Amino acid sequence: MTSSPAVRPYRPADRPALDDICIRTAHNGQDSRPVYTDPTIIPTIFADPYVELEPELAFVLDDGHGQAVGYILGTADTPRFTEAFRTKWLPRVAARHPAPSGPPTTPDEAMASLLHHPERMTLPQLTAYPAHLHIDLLPDWQGRGHGRTLMRTFLRALHDRGVPRVHLSMATANTQARAFYDRMGFVELDVPGPGPVTYLGRTTEDDRP
């Protein structure tokens, strides 16, 4: 029997699908495989540590056949997550993705630098927005309302935990994602010198029509 697509909590069996989704949407919303020699570093930074360290805040879009085709995940407390990333996650993956010996010169080295510097996530300008998130859907599942459902599910989970606000960072060049976040009520935050990255935030109250 075929079921309709639906958002559900993450299950450990979803891990390979989440890694694939992350890789196929990581380059300004496009497939990152042509860009990186080893694209597995992308979920090692932006997906896997979240489902390992805070799985209760990971949700997937199920295609109705048990396959994850999108996800939203994150943390309720960025400083706490940063510390857990440093002490619990990084030792498990550091040898597979060594830190560059100098300034990054390739896309892979740039990602490795991010991996080895989790403190980059904790910025004083974001103190009032303690939670943060990552959301990705495969292209065929975008523009159909599923992103909104994922976002509302995550915001509700944060709100139920008493978390007042959430932020995210995105590639400034990803205009399609920015349009979605604008529709979801996110506003740009004043974070000096982000370079090609924009920070957005909003309350966790579900106040959108």
Image (cartoon, rainbow, N blue to C red):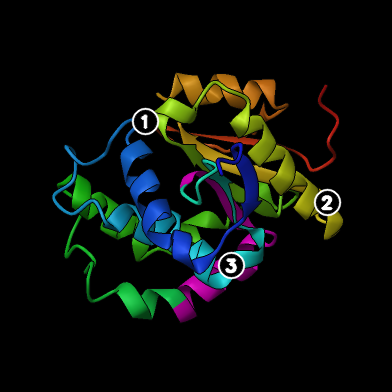
- Is residue 70 found inside the magenta-colored segment of the image? yes
Query: If you read the primary sequence from the N terminus, does the residue marked by circle 1 or circle 3 appear first?
Result: 1
How far apart are the two marked residues, 2 and 1, measured between alpha carbons?
29 Å
Q: Nearer the viewer, mark 2 or mark 3?
A: 2
Closer-to-camera residue (81/72): 72
- Is residue 28 found inside the magenta-colored segment of the image? no
Find residue 56 and report its image quarter.
bottom right
Q: Where residue 18 appears, x then y in whole percent?
A: 42, 53
x 77%, y 53%: residue: 158
Query: If you read the primary sequence from the N terminus, does the residue marked by circle 2 or circle 1 appear first?
Result: 1
Three-letter code for the amino acid on which mark 2 is drawn: His
x 47%, y 36%: residue: 137
The disc placed on residue 81 is 3
Name the residue carrying label 1.
28
Q: Where residue 87 appears, x then y in whole percent?
A: 47, 80
Q: Residues within 10 Å of mark 2 (few under 14, many from 20)?
A: some
Above/below status of 195 relative to 22: above
Above/below status of 50 relative to 195: below
Q: Would residue 87 be found to the left or right of residue 150 on screen?
A: left
Q: Are marks 1 and 3 in contact (CB under 8 Å)?
A: no
Three-letter code for the amino acid on which mark 3 is drawn: Phe
Asked if residue 136 shows in the view, the reply is yes
User: Is disc 1 placed on a helix, strand or loop?
Assistant: loop
The disc placed on residue 159 is 2
Q: Residues within 10 Å of mark 3 (few under 14, many from 20)?
A: many
x 41%, y 28%: residue: 139
**Residue range (magenta):** 68-88
Above/below status of 13 relative to 25: below
